[in-house]
Structures are given as C-alpha cells and as structure tokens.
Image (spheres, rainbow, N blue to C red):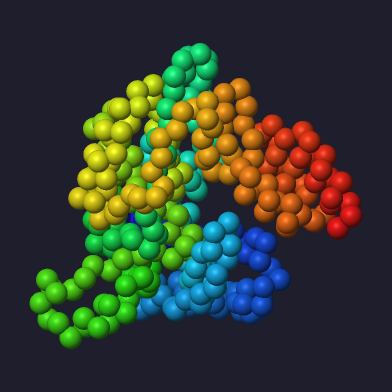
Amino acid sequence: MEDTFLEIISLENLLLAWREFRRGKRNKPDVQIFERNLEDNLFALHQELEEKTYRHGDYTSFYIRDPKLRLIHKATVRDRVLHHAVYRVLYPIFDKSFIYDSYSCRLKKGTHKAVDRLESFAKKVSKDYSDKCFILKCDVRKFFASVNHEVLYLLLGNKIQDKNVIWLLREIIGSFATNSRVLRLCSGFTRESFWPAAKGLPIGNLTSQLFANIYLNQFDQFIKNHLRLKFYARYTDDFVIVSNDIEFLVDLIPKIAEFLSDNLKMELHPNKICIRKFRQGIDFLGYVILPHYRILRTKTKERMLKNLNKQNLASYLGLLSHCSAFKLKQEIVELAKNR
C-alpha cells in the first residue's frame, strides 16, 4: 500500500489515464488544447503531485436531463485526467470488498445485470411465480449532495494507510462541497465544533462513482451481515429488497433509516419508499418487471420516441433487447427511417 501513491502519480499511469479519458472527447476544444502540449502537461501534473503542490481547479456547472434535471459539475481536463489515474489504481483495491449485488459503476455489472438479478430474486421468492412476493424499493434523498466528507475520509482511511494518497483524496474531495457557502460564512470561527461538515460529491467526477460505492458499501454490509438479507440489490442509491412477507419489509424501513442517519448522515427519500406486489410490476432502472416478462418504463419509452434518430437507433434497439418490446422495436425502426 505504501507504493500506491507512486503508482497513481507515475507518468505511465497518467498517460494511460489520459488515453482512457480522451475516448469520445477528441473533438472537445478543451481536450484538444490539453493534447497540443500533452507531454508537458502530464509532466507538470506529475511534478505537482510529486512535490504536493497540486491543487484541484474549479468546476464549471450545467444542467442535463437524465431523465430528471441534474446539475453537473465539470472539472478541468487536467483534473479529470487525474481522476482517471486515481480510479485506475484504487478501483481494484476497493472493488474486492464490495458485495456481489452492488451494480453501479463496476466491471461486469451495470443496470441490466441489476434488473436480471431482481427478476431472479422475485422468481425464487414467488416459487416460480406461484406464491406471493413483495418488493421494497427505496432511494437515498439527494445522495451525491449529502455525502459527508468526514465520514468518507474515515472510510477511505480504513482501507488506505498511505498518507500521501489520503492527502490527494482530500484534495479531490475537498475541491467541492454543496454547502461551500455555509463553510465560507463560518470561516471566522476558531472552535472546530462551530464548523459544519463539508458535504457533497460532484456528479461529473469519475472518482465520485467510486467514492459513492465506498460510502454505501457500509450500508450494503449492514444489510447483508447484520440484517442478513439474501434478496437485496443496489444500484447507486436505488435499492430493492424482496420477501414473501410484507410485514417483514415494513419493519425493515425504520431500521434502514436509522442506520443511514446514524452512520452515514443520510436519509431515505420519503416519497420514494414503496412496497409493491410483484404481480403489479416493479419499476426499477428504466424497466417494469412483472412475472414472466418485463417492459420498458412509460417515461423511458416517451423519451426514446422523442429523441430517436438514425444515429442512436442501435443503442435504443440494444436497450429494448432486454425486455418484451417487439411492436416498439418495429415502431422505432420505421420512425428512424423518416428522421
């Protein structure tokens, strides 16, 4: 572990990080500018990291609809290359400690694997769709905006003893806080007890995806090792639990809420806690899963039809290959021909 920092900041790793970062971005003006003096830029970054004079830059922000409106914070090219360099080295260290049924931003996982897993859970609990089956679905309220930096530093420190790596992670994490205005207003106080804890991870950072899994791994371990739940799956802050006992699921909600509050300084979204009978269908990650089949969520279908063109037809057909959508496939193929 003592060589982790040197591995992250090595010129070889920075170059590999650059190659990963630039995929699909070669036509972006800021990427082109960085590439014009690539060797000098990477060497300068390496030297700043080696001498610990590196400071993370500011962010530019913009909104995207995905499908709900999200505020994205975009770091500079230099900083995003470093994010890739950090991710390349730390991902394999932390990933082996994650549970099997954590599906977000992990190799050989993803949304479709998560949906498949939920479907297999429901089939098992319902005894091949012949018995009762209920699904509890929840998500964490404003997850990325609520990540407590001190809690995250503690979790990172449990796994990483290299003080230089911790310095670098603090520089990246501390570059952003959703309550930064409050922190600035409190800067006059000298007593530590007056300081509110910094919160928030920028959705646009690659490192935020890894930090999110590290943060919620504590919750996963609580679910699996303390509550001993077998039929549980999580994708980012969306999670599902399957049971044949509705009262059991109802009783879980306050236990889950208490753990999130006490240990991670977070809360369940009060409007997104639901328990449904499997035969009614469960809406999860863009699909509605029912006994024997699954269909595309109505809002996902509407967005697809609105944004459809010849360029994205193949990706939409790929999305539809994971559900029952024969007529919809025919419809979008015809529509794409006329756009």
In the rendered image, which quarter contains the C terminus? Answer: bottom right
Return the x and y of residue 3 as percentages of the image width and height: 35, 56
Q: What residue is rendered at 49% in x and 27% in y?
A: 278
Return the x and y of residue 166 as percentages of the image width and height: 29, 62
In-front residue for pair 115/190: 115
User: Is 140 positioned to the left or the right of 338 in the image?
Assistant: left
User: Is 83 positioned to the left or the right of 194 in the image?
Assistant: right
Number of numbered discs present?
Answer: 0
Q: Residue furthest bottom?
A: 188
Q: Quadrant of residue 320?
A: top right
In-front residue for pair 325/86: 325
In-front residue for pair 314/154: 314
Q: Residue furthest right?
A: 338
Return the x and y of residue 85 as percentages of the image width and height: 48, 61
Q: What residue is rendered at 33% in x and 61% in y?
A: 146
User: Is 79 positioned to the left or the right of 161 in the image?
Assistant: right
Q: What residue is rendered at 20% in x and 50% in y?
A: 262
Q: What residue is rendered at 72% in x and 35% in y?
A: 325
Q: Is residue 116 among the parts visible in the rendering?
A: no
Return the x and y of residue 201 as percentages of the image width and height: 39, 63
Above or below for 42 versus 297: below
User: Is 7 positioned to the left or the right of 285 in the image?
Assistant: left
Q: Is residue 172 among the parts visible in the rendering?
A: yes
Above or below for 135 versus 61: above
